[in-house]
Amino acid sequence: MLEIKNLHVKLQDEDKVILKGMNLTVETGKVHAIMGPNGSGKSTMSYVLSGRDGYEVTEGSATLGGKELLDMEPEERAAAGLFLAFQYPVEIPGVGNMTFLRTALNAQRKARGEEELSAGEFLKLVREKAKTLKIDADMLKRPVNVGFSGGEKKRNEILQMAMLEPKMCILDETDSGLDVDAMRLVADGVNALRAPDRSFLVITHYQRLLDHIKPDVVHIMADGRILQTGGPELALEVENNGYAEILAAHGLTEAK
Amino acid sequence: MQDADIREGVDRETVETVQNMGSYKYGWETEIEMEYAPKGISEEIVRLISKKNDEPEWMLDWRLQAYARWVGMTEPDWALLDLPKIDYQDLYYYARPKSMVEKPKSLDEVDPKLLATYEKLGIPLKEQMILAGVEGAENINLEERQVAVDAVFDSVSVGTTFKAKLAEAGVIFCSISEAIKEHPELVQKYLGSVVPQTDNYFATLNSAVFSDGSFVYVPPGTRCPMELSTYFRINAENTGQFERTLIICDRGAYVSYLEGCTAPKRDTAQLHAAVVEIVVLEDAEVKYSTVQNWFPGDEEGKGGIYNFVTKRADCREARAKVMWTQVETGSAITWKYPSCILRGDESSGEFYSIAIANNFQQADTGTKMVHLGKNTRSRIVSKGISAGQAQNTYRGLVSMHPRAKNSRNYTQCDSLLIGDKCGAHTVPYIEVKNNSSRVEHEATTSKVDDDQLFYCRARGVGEEEAVALVVNGFCRDVLQALPMEFAMEAQSLVAISLEGSVG
């Protein structure tokens, strides 16, 4: 599904290299987790994949279903099936959540040459999905993320994911700032969306999210690349021992 | 839920418009034989215009008085506008389609080319809606959607619809030239009573040379059975349009009035200097909505309409209410301050405005709320959007006179910048001359945030559409104040006027 090969990325305006030869393959239908210390380049990777400005790819490639992502505009990547659940979802004052969802869904459908949904069809769909995610009707009417609590914002990201039905979902520290109950709600939402034709890449600092969203593969990332790959037990190991040992094995220190 | 569904529909409209986005949509020109008065302005021209309109003596005298005054006046220079020199002798002050020399008795006698022009603008001039109502019995709701239209083409009114139906309710809706002849007592009583001849340079010029416009009278206790609308179109080259609108809403009456404006694309600038006067009597209410989409000039700032407009409502008696809503997307230069004189006790005025300036457009617009009566209320919500190299100024006056005890004003002025070459300015003037009134002013300036745009794009929304979405969100308070038909048009216009402002 997603294949990142030897990806090198620097900041556009500074001489700072962030990704240094990253390799990663996420198979169709699998859930991969990426853990790593602060500053390892996890969020940068998610931004570069979804096409945010401010980064320069100096080498390497990233393909989704065999198509090169890095040549596409952000909206084309979304239409191709990529979805990024933001660490900090953005507020858009005055734009109703429903309007936003419908605009996005129909833009994607149009880009793929599919029929756009009518107001009626859309309403039915959004109400159904909201109900499964335990999102009340009031949240649908409010402006996008404005005045939402941390938990509501993250659940709203999952609602968008449910509506847009992407093939490849990246969750960028979706658990940050959530209490245990809110995290469980979000995790339940993600689990409900797991499907044989949908892959996930879960970026997190903490093992506890992975108790709820069980990964097939865990990667440890630091210094702009993947250092180690293993099964779910790797996450437990990090939880108990920290990153020091893994970093040291690659000649890195934690301070970095 | 009904409401939310309709809003969805409105947004869909925006989205589709953005997707089919072209450049200025109304830039075409109608090839039609015109009759012009000679170029330039003089006493003879004023007399000629009056004669062409077959006016009574008192009207001509009024015009001549204004002209004599205007000759000694100078253009105002206090606005934050870079005003090019206007050669007033190089303009035509009167142009009418030849077919209108003999005023048609009914719409059937109107030149089909003219009607086609308005059809192209999406206006149901030929009372198409009535016809549809007869044939399509399934459209029972059509009744509610009826809008009576007066269409002004260059200097003359070409037709007014639904006259008979309005007359049944006692409402007079006709061109002002007709009103001068048919209802002289009303015109004489109210013309110039809100915006005096001597008010300002452009209003005085208008008083001398105005050629046509709309007239509305709603009798006491009458709720006007439909929305009234005037569409203004400047077609002829080098021609100024000077229309004059007079609305009188008698005691306890109500009317909602819509105004739309377009003009062809030309690389020379055109002058538009209109006057709108509204008289609101005891317990009456007037809503006046404008969607102004005059040609804004091209991407390099060539051509476009210079829009110098004086609009004022006089809440003359107790509990009179007026609401101005404007969406200003067009014109190369906009100089416009729809105002409320809150003379009657407990009268109230509201002003909702969206002003968009892109490329080289300049807008200096706002309102005046003059509180004279006790317990008067006013509310101002202004949304200014600047893109390209445009300059957008909000200029507003809130004045509480000594007699205006316990009066209130709330002002909210928000500016949105797109790109880093444009400017937004807020110039509020506040005068409070009693100690029981309260004035609140809030202002914000923000930029269309890259994070917001990226968030939309990461969800599959293209860049232009993302800007339209964010800007429409910014304008939401004002868009909601518009009648539904206009809200849709306005949303699309917001998207179209910002075309090419990003990337």
Image (cartoon, rainbow, N blue to C red):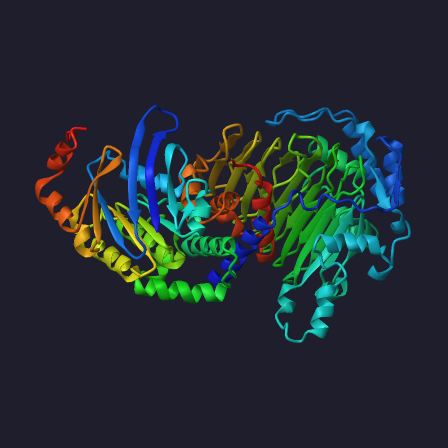
Looking at this view, name the residue that lies furthest to the bottom: B137
Q: Is residue A95 visible?
A: no
Residue at horizontal 88 percent and vertical 53 percent from the top: B103
In this rendering, position of residue B178 left or right of residue B429: right
Which sits in the foreground, B388 or B411? B388
Left or right of A73? Residue B317 is right
How many marks do you count on the picture? Answer: 0
Picture coordinates of residue B116, whole percent (x, y):
78, 55
Which quarter shows the N terminus of chain B?
A: bottom left
Whether residue B93 is visible:
yes
Q: Nearer the viewer, residue A138 or A211?
A: A211
Residue A193, relative to residue B68: is it above or below? below
Q: Nearer the viewer, residue A95 or A195?
A: A195
Identify the residue at image location x=29%, y=40%: A23
Taking the image as shown, residue B256 lies to the left or right of residue B64, namely left
Left or right, residue A77 beside residue B333: left
Q: Residue A165 location in percent, x, y?
A: 38, 58
Vertical placement of residue B90 versus B216, above or below: above
Location of residue A224 in the rendering, given as x and y in whole percent from the top left corner: 27, 34
Residue B371 spot, x, y in % from top left: 54, 40
Residues A130 and B139: in front is: A130
